[in-house]
Image (spheres, rainbow, N blue to C red):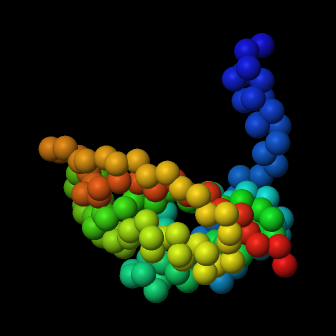
């Protein structure tokens, strides 16, 4: 077995649950009670469900409550984007920048905030008007 195949098998064996989460709810996981979790990830979600930065902060706080102390948060967010379109409908996004996201994560009780920014310019016909993406990881402070 190749190295990447072994890693794939190990990862699949390590994942215990993939759970539906509604970050707008007070109890994001509903009645499921399996948390808090070692790792919680959100990919391109937070800027789409909120109305403004205050709403982003509240939603982020709810998401972060699912991470156990010492656990890891993984975020991927659009930067400087105002909209996304599927070709028929245009959806507004909260316009976010990297310093704001980093600080919001710190304000939610995380440390060791690290990120990479992938610069990406939209071309004709693309569905998005942002400048880049941020890939961020952070560790939740111990209680």
Residue in front for this viewpoint, 68 or 12: 68
Q: Residue at x 45, y 70 (%)?
A: 99
Q: Residue at x 23, y 48 (%)?
A: 122
x%, y% of residue 50?
44, 76
* Quadrant assignment, res 75: bottom right
Quadrant housing the C terminus: bottom right
x%, y% of residue 10?
80, 33
Q: Is residue 47 visible?
A: no
Left or right placement of residue 135 versus residue 29 in this view: left
Left or right placement of residue 36 versus residue 8 in this view: right
* Quadrant assignment, res 41: bottom right
Left or right placement of residue 69 versus residue 106 in this view: right
Instruction: List the single residue furthest toward the left.
Output: 124
Q: Residue at x 79, y 59 (%)?
A: 38
Q: Residue at x 48, y 78 (%)?
A: 56
Residue in front for this viewpoint, 134 or 1: 134
Q: Is residue 31 visible?
A: yes
Instruction: List the single residue furthest toward the top.
Output: 1
């Amino acid at each position: 077995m190749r190295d990447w195949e072994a890693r794939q098998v190990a990862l699949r064996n390590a994942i215990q649950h993939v759970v539906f989460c509604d970050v707008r709810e007070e109890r994001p996981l509903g009645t499921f009670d399996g948390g808090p979790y070692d790792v919680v990830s959100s990919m391109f979600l937070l800027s789409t469900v909120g109305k403004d930065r205050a709403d982003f902060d509240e939603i982020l706080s709810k998401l972060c409550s699912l991470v156990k102390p010492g656990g890891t948060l993984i975020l991927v967010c659009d930067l400087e984007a105002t909209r996304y379109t599927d070709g028929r409908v245009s959806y507004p996004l909260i316009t976010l920048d990297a310093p704001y996201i980093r600080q919001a994560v710190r304000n939610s009780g995380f440390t060791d905030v690290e990120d990479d920014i992938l610069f990406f310019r939209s071309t004709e016909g693309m569905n998005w008007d942002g400048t880049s993406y941020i890939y961020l990881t952070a560790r939740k402070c111990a209680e």
